[in-house]
Image: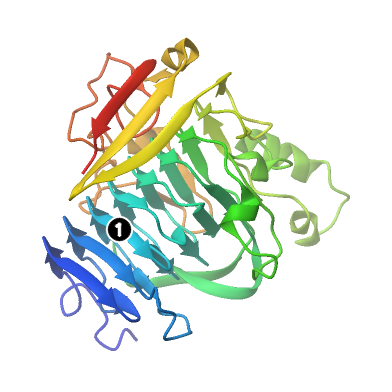
Amino acid sequence: MQHGWDKETIGSHVIRRNTIRDCGQTAIVGHLGGVFSTIEDNHIHDIAVKREFYGYEIAGIKLHAAIDVTIRHNHIHHCSLGVWLDWQTQGTRVSRNVLHANRRDLFVEVSHGPYLVEHNVFGSPAALEVFSQGGAFVHNLVLGTVRLEPVLDRATPYHRPHSTQVTGYAVILGGDDRWIGNLFAGADPAAAYGPDAEGVAPATAGTAGYDGHPASFEEYRDRIDAQPPGDHQRFAGVRQPVYARGNVYAPGARAFAGEHGAVVLPAATLSIDSEDDACYLAADLPAEFDRARLDPIGGRDLGRVRFPDAEFEEPDGTPARLDIDLTGETRSPGLPAAAGPVAGLTAGRSRVRIW
C-alpha cells in the first residue's frame, strides 16, 4: 500500500528565486512530500547559526526521500549544514550549486542511489559527508574534507526508478560510488571537526578514504571468488567497488589507491571570494592542471548502482546529461575540458565569477 504517496498526488513543487535567511532551524524542509520537486536559483544563508535548536532537521535544505528532486544553482552559505539528504536519495541531482562558509556543506545519509552530485563548489572545511552508497560525484570543486562511513545498523528502502514504489531494503556498506573529474584542494580535518565529533570514520582530503575498496566490479567478483566456500557469509567482509578516474589533487589531497589517471599537482591555490552579492573562484594552478582534460560525462558512463539495480537517468528515463558547467557553459563532445566545475579553467592565475 502506498497510502497516496505517489507522483500523481504528492510533490512536484517548485521553489525558485527566493532569498531565505536568518531561520533558526531550516530554510527548506521536506519529509516524503518533497518528491519530484525542483529547488533552484535560491540564495540561502544564516540558517541555524545561533544553535537555538538541536535535532535532525537542521540545514539550509533538509529532505527525506528526495526522489527525483533537482537541487540546482543555489547559493548556500553561513549555515550550520548546507544540504542534508536523508534516506531514499534516489534519482536526486545536486547540480551547479555554490556552498561555502558553512559548518558542513553536503551530507548524504543512508541512501542507495543512484544520485548525482555534479558541477558544484563545496568550499567549507567539512565539505562532503557520504554515509551512503551508489553516488556519482562529477566535476566538483572540493576545498574541504571528505568523510565516508558505512551504516550497518539501519536498513533503509530503495525504489523502482522514478517511483515511490519500494523494491527492497539494505544497510549501507559504503562504496559503489563514482568520482570523475573532480578538483580537490588540501584540507585540514582538525579545522573541519572538533575533538568530540560524532562518528568513527576519519575525515580526509581527496578520495583516499576509499583505500582498500576494489577499483572495478571485476575485482570485486574476484575477491568474492577468493572467499572460503559458504553462503551469504562470503560477501560480508568484501567491500563494494569504487570507480574513480581523472580527478585532480592539489597538495594535501590524496587519491584513492585504485584510481585511474589521477593528476597530482605540485602546487595550487584555490579560494572562494565574496564581494557584495557576487562570488568568485580565485585560482593559481600549475601547468600540470592542463593535463586533466575530460570528454563530457553522461549517464551511460556511470554504470548501474548495485542495490536498486538502476542507472543514472533524467526524470524521463533517458541517460543523465552532465554537459552544463557551473557558469552555464556547455561541455561539447570531442572537446575535452577541465576537471572541476568550470570547463574553461586553465593553468595560471584566474578569477571566475561563479554566482
Extreme residue in the right direction: 228
Identify the residue under disc 1.
Answer: 76
**Image height of 191 relative to 37, above or below:** above
Where, by quadrant of the figure, is residue 194 drawn? bottom right
- Of residues 260 and 342, which is closer to you in this image? 342
Give the amino acid type for the residue marked by disc 1 in the picture. Ile
Q: Is residue 160 visible?
A: no
**Image height of 260 relative to 327, above or below:** above
Q: Identify the residue at horizontal 44%, vertical 56% (top origin).
A: 113
Indicate the secondary structure of the residue bearing disc 1.
Answer: strand
**Image height of 13 relative to 327, above or below:** below
Q: Identify the residue at horizontal 24%, vertical 85% (top origin).
A: 4
Q: Is residue 102 left or right of residue 211?
A: left
Q: Is residue 202 left or right of residue 61?
A: right
* Neighbour tally class for label 1: few under 14, some 14-19, many 20 plus, Cα within 10 Å: many
Q: Identify the residue at horizontal 41%, vertical 59% (top origin).
A: 102
- Of residues 235 and 23, which is closer to you in this image? 23
Q: Position of residue 209 (x, y in %)?
A: 66, 45
Q: Position of residue 283 (x, y in %)?
A: 38, 27
Where, by quadrant of the figure, is residue 282 drawn? top left
State which quarter of the image contains the C terminus. top left
- Of residues 135 and 316, which is closer to you in this image? 135
Q: Position of residue 275 (x, y in %)?
A: 23, 45
**Image height of 297 relative to 142, above or below:** above
Q: Is residue 63 left or right of residue 8?
A: right
